[in-house]
Amino acid sequence: MAVVTLAGNPNSGKTTLFNALTGSSQYVGNWPGVTVEKKEGQLRNHRDISIVDLPGIYSLSPYTLEEVVARRYLLEQQPDLIVNIVDSMNIERNLYLTLQLMETGNPIIISLNMLDLLKKSGKKINLKKLSYMLQVPVIGISALKHENLDKLTNHMLDNQENYPYPQYDERIESALTMIQATLHTEVPENEERWYAIKLFERDEDVMQALELNPAKQEEIEQTITTAEKIFSDNSDSIIVNARYDYIAKIVDMCVINNDDAKMSFS
Ligand code: BGO
């Protein structure tokens, strides 16, 4: 059975979409070992596709129970596809999670939700450009009004490939490449990028889990320290800022506010 997981920020419309996609075929339980609700169901008219609803999260950092559950699931279970629900009314904030989901190395499509509200607001998002810039399929939907859910389902049924990762500043990329080179024998290829970023951030859970030998640890630490000197910043903030810079570029290219349109004609 193919497994599709729904991931998104709280209030992005995940529950509404989950209910629309699964109808009454739902099972509610808890994620292993924690009291965080886990919902599963089967895709309407496609009982061979299981839909797993991840907890609503803003990030894949290990700071909340929900984030821990989500990142453990994505790395250990490797779903066949992530459907990332993005609230089109809050696209900038939502894309922060999108980039991290892409970094996990799982195939992903974006369902850009709340298009009914977006239309009313006068704001416009160029879906083709968004898809081109992220190199990920983007399907505009209204989960509440059940608009375009067939199109979303068709994309879910397509064979999914792996998609490129967001590429950051070239100085960050060269540091990540160096860290990745030390991981070839340690983690599966499609997860190297995720682990390299986490090691660059000095994520303690990942550092402990990988149990790298002291020589590799030292090599990685030197790479991080060099990057920190170049950027005059700590490695954690370097990555956070890189993601926000990337999002700013995308929003600049793909989102047209009503006010911008008026200004361009005046
Ligand atoms: C309330 N369009 C519109 N207009 N609204 C949507 C859409 C959409 O496409 N999708 C979802 N919503 P959840 P999470 C509400 O509950 O699915 C709305 O956290 C209200 N409730 O109906 O719960 C959805 O699972 C009172 O709105 O999100 C819900 O991701 C007044 O977005 C909210 C107004 O959806 C969050 C709205 C008592």
Image (cartoon, rainbow, N blue to C red):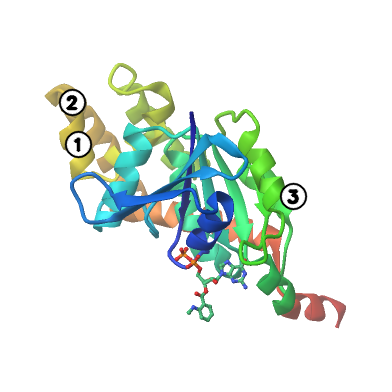
Q: Nearer the viewer, residue 190 or 142?
A: 142
Disc 1 C-beta below 8 A from ligand 1: no
Name the element at disc 1.
helix
The residue sitting at 36% across, 22% down in the picture is 188
Work out which residue is located at the far right of the displayed protein and give it: 265
Q: Is residue 253 above or below residue 46?
A: below
- Residue bearing mark 2: 212
Amino acid found under the numbered disc labelled 1: Met
Q: From mark 1 to mark 2, how far is it between C-alphas?
A: 8 Å
SS under mark 2: loop
Which of the 4 image quarters holds residue 117?
bottom right
x, y percentage for residue 64? Answer: 25, 58
Where does the image place residue 251, in percent across and percent down from the top left?
62, 61
User: Outermost residue, front direction?
Assistant: 24
Q: Residues within 10 Å of mark 1 (few under 14, many from 20)?
A: some
Residue 143, disc: none
Please report the residue visible at 43 percent of the width from the left and 65 percent of the height from the top.
Answer: 10
Mark seen at residue 128: 3
State which mark lies toward you, 3 or 2.
3
Bin the neighbour count of mark 3 within 10 Å (Cα to Cα): few under 14, some 14-19, many 20 and up.
few
Q: Secondary structure at mark 3?
A: helix
